[in-house]
Amino acid sequence: MSFLNDTKVIYSHFGCLSTYMFGANILSTQPLAGLRLLVLEDEFLIAMDVEQICSDHGAEEVIICKTLSEANSIGGDYDAAIIDLTLNGESTIPFAAELQNRDLPFIFASGYTDREDIAADFPTIAMVGKPYSGEELVKALLAALSRKLPVDR
């Protein structure tokens, strides 16, 4: 579960830590099971939260890249990507366009959700605005994957 978005922490008088999910969890199964995901995010805490969200929903591996050079160095050996619009001030749009040309599923996760150029250039790609819930992120990722994966996934 995502500790930054979806949980409430409760401390007992014994110093033990427990957590519980807010609301109904419609993603109670492992919808990302077996997937290798790329996360382009330059904010450490957000990247760790996304990694935890994906792992909690079954992702086999989550690769975090904080720069485009890191992302380009790993090649395309992943099933889908979660992309912030800018990494340390550098636009990720050319990288996203390359993924789109290769028909690799991805979503944008950014604080810049009002950019009309993104909607025009990537009309079928989901834009999840920060801050987002884990459920919101996984739903968008599943929608992107559903255009690529077999129906029984």
Image (spheres, rainbow, N blue to C red):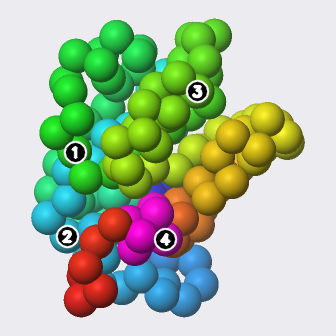
Circle number at residue 78: 1
Q: CA distance from mark 1 to mark 4?
A: 17 Å
Hey, what amino acid is under mark 2? Answer: Ala
Residue annotated with mark 2: 33
Q: Neighbour class for label 1 at 10 Å: few (<14), some, many (≥20)?
A: some
Q: Dot 2: what SS?
A: loop
User: Residue 35 location in percent, x, y?
Assistant: 20, 59
User: Residue 39 location in percent, x, y?
Assistant: 38, 38
Q: Compare residues 126 and 32 and report the one nearer the observer.
A: 126
Residue annotated with mark 4: 143
The disc, 3 or 4, on the residue closer to the chain's N-terminal end is 3
Q: Compare residues 61 and 73 and report the one nearer the observer.
A: 73
Q: Relative to 112, is 68 on the left or the right?
A: left
Q: CA distance from mark 1 to mark 2?
A: 13 Å
Hey, what amino acid is under mark 4? Answer: Ala
Magenta segment main secondary structure: helix
Q: Residue at x 60, y 18 (%)?
A: 91
Hey, what amino acid is under mark 1? Answer: Tyr
Q: CA distance from mark 2 to mark 3?
A: 28 Å
Q: CA distance from mark 3 to mark 1?
A: 18 Å
The disc, 3 or 1, on the residue closer to the chain's N-terminal end is 1
Residue contact between numbered discs 4 and 2, judged by CB atoms under 8 Å: no
Residue annotated with mark 3: 93
Residue 14, located in which quarter of the rendered image?
A: bottom left
Q: Relative to 82, is 37 on the left or the right?
A: left
User: Residue 43 location in percent, x, y?
Assistant: 52, 25
The disc, 2 or 3, on the residue closer to the chain's N-terminal end is 2
